[in-house]
Amino acid sequence: MEEGLRERKKRETRQRIADVAMGLFMTRGFDPVTVAEIARTADVSVNTVFNYFPTKEDLFADRQELVTDLPQQVVRGRRPGESVARAFRRDFMEALDSRHWRYGLNEGGDVFARIVNGSPSLVAKLRELHVARERALARALADELDADPDDLTPQMVATQILGTTRILTTHAVTRMLAGESWETIAPDLRAQATAAFDLLESGIGDYCVRPSVGEDGRQDAGPEPEDHEDGPED
């Protein structure tokens, strides 16, 4: 459906407010900047700011809906015969190579982390966002496998995968904050990620594999279980 004029103006206003806020946060930090200052700089009212962003923390995390959805996109986009652990390995390595922001490996990721670390309310907000991502990924896994509501496995798998990527990101960003160059960090991060995903795949590598498609176009559920006949008794 084509975006209407009203929707486009609302989207542009929201983006302008978010861009102004982030510029101020990056210059002066999160806590010293007020919502009134953001509104004044963006040439809108304070009420308008809150119409788009319920809290000041939401201004900083303006892409939180997209960030929450990204792990689900990895699940939906896995290739035929590819497990969810293998899909996340591929996605993380691609982000590492391109320095994409989805795992916080982008240039400036250390600046983002420094702002968060300087504000207890942002630390809490990011923790809340991590929990939301894990719950959303668990729901996506449960839906893919039509899991029983009482099955805790999707939540456990989601926590393991996103906990692993978060640890890898924290390792990289900590070194960025210490002044190391990306050329030094990247090879070691790749090695650490390879080892981490090897561990994941040894434990949950067969979980949530997308069925392959046979030549006739039908999904191949995998090999039939072998028939083991009992031999003669001794």
Image: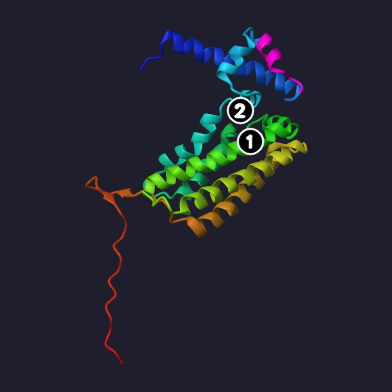
Looking at the image, can residue 77 be seen? no
| Frontmost residue, 115 versus 183 | 115
Magenta residue span = 32-41
User: Which mark is drawn over residue 126?
Assistant: 1
Q: Are marks 1 and 2 in contact (CB under 8 Å)?
A: yes
- Tell me the kind of residue under disc 1: Leu
In magenta stretch: residue 38: yes
User: Mark 1 packing: few (<14 Cα in 10 Å), some, or many (20+)?
Assistant: some
232 to 32, vertically: above or below = below
Q: In terms of depth relative to the viewer, which is nearer, 114 or 211?
A: 114
Q: Which residue corresponds to mark 2?
A: 61
User: Magenta stretch containing residue 154, yes or no?
Assistant: no
Magenta stretch, overall SS: helix
How far apart in space, not on screen, are marks 1 and 2 (Cα)? 8 Å
x, y percent for residue 55: 62, 24
Query: Looking at the image, which residue sits at the far left?
Result: 216
Image location of residue 194, percent across then percent down: 58, 51
The answer to whether 25 appears left or right of 64 in the picture is: right
Question: Which residue is more in the foreground, 110 or 57?
Answer: 57
Callout 1 secondary element: helix
Under circle 2, the secondary element is: loop
Q: Position of residue 179 (x, y in %)?
A: 77, 36
